[in-house]
Amino acid sequence: MSGSLRCSISLSPLHSNEFPRIPVTKPRIHVPVPKPMTVALSKVVSPLRVAAPGVMIEAAGLEVDRVTEAELKENGFRSTRKTKIVCTIGPRTCEFEEIEALTVGGMNVARVNMCHGTREWHRDVIRRVRQLNEEKGFAVAVMMDTEGSEIHMDDLNDVESTKAEDGQIWTFTVRAFDQPSRPERTITVNYDGFAEDVKVGDELLVDGGMVTFVVIEKIGPDVICRCTDPGLLLPRANLTFWRNGSLVRERNAMLPTISSKDWLDIDFGIEEGVDFIAVSFVKSAEVIKTLKSYIIDRSPGSQIGIIAKIESIDSLKNLEEIIQVSDGTMVARGDLGAQIPLEQVPLVQHEVIQLCRQLNKPVIVASQLLESMIEYPIPTRAEVADVSEAVGQQADALMLSSESAMGQYPEKALAVLRSVSLRIEKCRREETHWDVTDLRIVSSSKLDEISEEICNTTSRMANKLKADAIFVYTKTGQTASLLSRNRPDCPIFAFAPSTSIQRCLNLKWGLIPFRLDFSDDMESNLNRTFSLLKARAMMKSGDLIIVVSDAMQSIQAIKVP
Ligand SMILES: Nc1ncnc2c1ncn2[C@@H]1O[C@H](COP(=O)(O)OP(=O)(O)O)[C@@H](O)[C@H]1O
Ligand SMILES: C=C(OP(=O)(O)O)C(=O)O
Ligand SMILES: [K+]
Ligand SMILES: [Mg+2]
């Protein structure tokens, strides 16, 4: 599907000014908006300008993310950004103003990684995101990512990193040391079975090969290794061992996907009302099913979406089943690249994106998208090509990890994702190769199958008629998702009755989620929506809209009166 991208090359800015930048309805509360950032690629795309600050006009009953609204007006309907962006929040971006700057820069989902930091730290971040949503009219979703049972080094206590030199002898052990007495060149490993699993002659890879050791001796709980590829050892770096060119799957293969600590983190996530839980090192569909019923038990009616991270070799055998039972998937290329040969990672990415589209699940492409921007203000050409590939493959979302968590240029990295997305999406719209006949039917009942066909037809119609937008009135989000799956040229305005569904829809390609109370009377819904949108200068008379809803199995094409 990624295919070759043929498009006309234009060096002029992408955004068009055909939609006047009219400030949103008079704000009730004045909130300062951080200055828009200038971007490395600003020759191509100008920074986003959020119009006058304002809050979601709840009184009018229509709520849309203020930043999305600004993007719509700035880029023009048809060329508004479709690819969503997830940013990992870390020490560099955890303050209120920093989270706000990312939000204004286009972050759709904020991710906290339970591998690092304390629960209190994460609680503060989650609450700041929520507070910003409430006070400033954003609709950023929160994703909590579990630590999972990977084998990793300890925190290194007082040091930020330590260098392993070629030929040096290091000891990896499960002994616990009081920090001052930890012998030199000794690393504590979190997994008790470590010494039992490895054999003399095994290769020990730190962070998928950033540093490599060979095991030369085992003495009780200590594994003595010689460094063969020198480099920096970072806190909590992941460890894998290899024998005769294959990943060693011994007792560690039996490690639970969700550890006891993960269960406590999940309880924490449920309490804090996160929108998504991303499960690390998923091996089978079972664990996702177990987690889902656990959540329903603890929090009936919960809308928390479960994202399966594809990052272990075991997940690849059960891909389809895993995707089927999850609410979305992440191609977690960091750990995946430590478990399978690197040259296979792009193939897995492609396969997972295709499968997710077929099975109607959102997919996030993650890790090292703009790795060099941890240190530098512009990306490498190769990184831009990688991001372009993911956008061209029409992944639902792109994710920043270290770039936003601890890098020096989080906002610039975000701006690069935004500008590359816009550019490549434009190319795809110019190609007229669209065909839904390739999509398999996902519905299990006849009624759902009809809805599915309606969504396919709606998207085809919208493209042929060059509609300005598709409107979908959806109680569960399902119809909106089926439309997104078609990747139509115009944006899909999804009207949902709750803010939690609105936030969850934020992860899906091309969906502009609104919160709106609507009735079964479509005519009155439409009249109300048109006048609300017109009042906010988000729509004008004559715009062509294709309308569908969960409740009615029909399609309407309407010129806005
Ligand atoms: N909550 C946090 N506290 C401290 N550092 C963090 C936090 N979240 C992320 N980081 C830093 O950002 C880096 C990248 O984040 P991420 O990709 O989520 O983790 P990792 O690559 O370790 O799995 C981490 O390695 C860590 O150095
Ligand atoms: C996203 C990933 O997971 P984490 O950052 O939690 O290791 C990854 O491994 O690519
Ligand atoms: K994690
Ligand atoms: Mg990982």
Image (tube, rainbow, N blue to C red):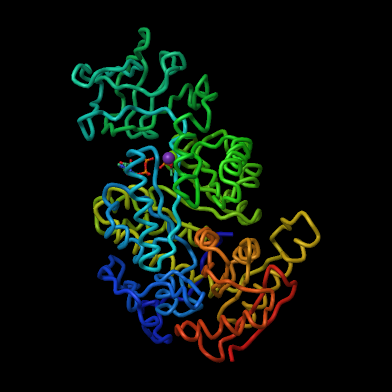
> Which residue appears at 29% of the width and 33% of the height?
235
Q: Is residue 321 left or right of residue 19?
A: right
Residue furthest to the front: 59
Residue 28: image quadrant is bottom left
Of the pair 245 and 13, the residue shown nearer to us: 13
x, y percent for residue 470: 60, 76
The quarter of the picture where residue 480 lies is: bottom right
Q: Residue 309 appears at what percent x and percent y?
A: 51, 43
Farthest left residue in view:
180
Q: Quadrant of ligand 4?
A: top left
Tell me, yes or no, if residue 337 can be seen here: no
Foreground: 346 or 325? 325
Q: Residue at x 28, y 65 (%)?
A: 40
View extreme (top): residue: 219
**What is the x, y in percent for residue 11?**
36, 77
Q: Which residue is the extreme one toward the right?
A: 446
Q: Residue at x 38, y 85 (%)?
A: 22
Residue 465 vs residue 230, the one in the foreground: 465
- In the picture, which quadrant includes the N terminus? bottom right
> Percent from the top left, x then y, of residue 415?
34, 64
Query: In the rendered image, is residue 110 in sight?
Result: yes
Q: Is residue 29 above or below residue 103?
A: below
